[in-house]
Amino acid sequence: MESMPTANSTLSLKPIPWSIDGSKVVLFGVAGVAALAIVGIGLGAAVGAFCSVERGVGLSEDWEKTFQTPTDAATLTKIGVYTQSDSDTRHVREVLEDHRPVAVELSTATGASSR
């Protein structure tokens, strides 16, 4: 049986092989804080850029509709095209008819109209 140490005896402590001294703990702590700061700056920059673009873009009345599902019935839109020559007029008419319009109406400067 081992004897109990007395007041005059000395104890020898052996270092634990996996222990880290105080300076390394501080170094790892500072490195961890720096890494978190870099990640936070990156996330903050991304969120800030998104918010500034969203706030800076000139919003129209239809901005809210961008994120909604479209309605079943679309409203008709009139398109006016002004041309100088008959060939341009024919070309515009062909392009418009490729998009299956409800109606294509041709009006001349004199006020005559044709469909």
Image: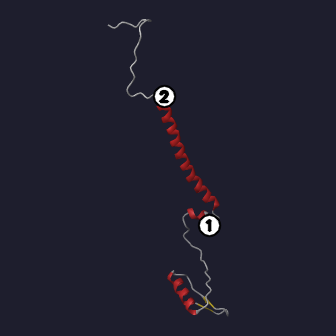
Identify the residue shown where x is 52% and y is 37%: 30
- Disc 2 from disc 1: Cα separation: 61 Å
Identify the residue shown where x is 51% and y is 81%: 100
Q: Residue 15: x percent and y percent?
A: 40, 22
- Can you tell which of label 2 and label 1 is closer to the viewer? 2
Q: Residue 13: x percent and y percent?
A: 40, 17
Quadrant for the C terminus, please.
bottom right
Q: Residue 34: x percent and y percent?
A: 52, 41
Q: Label 2 sits on what residue type?
A: Gly
Query: Which residue extends farthest left?
Result: 1
- Pick whichever of labels 2 and 1 is earlier in the sequence: 2
Q: Which sits in the foreground, 114 or 17?
A: 17
**Callout 2 secondary element:** helix
Q: Label 1 sits on what residue type?
A: Asp
Q: Is residue 11 left or right of residue 100?
A: left
**Callout 1 secondary element:** loop
Q: Which mark is residue 22?
A: 2
Q: Residue under circle 1? A: 62
Quadrant for the N terminus, please.
top left
Query: What is the crowding at mark 1: few (fewer than 14 residues within 10 Å), some, or many (at least 20)?
Result: few
Image height of 91 relative to 73, above or below: below
Q: Residue 6: x percent and y percent?
A: 42, 5
Count of all numbered marks drawn on residues in the image: 2
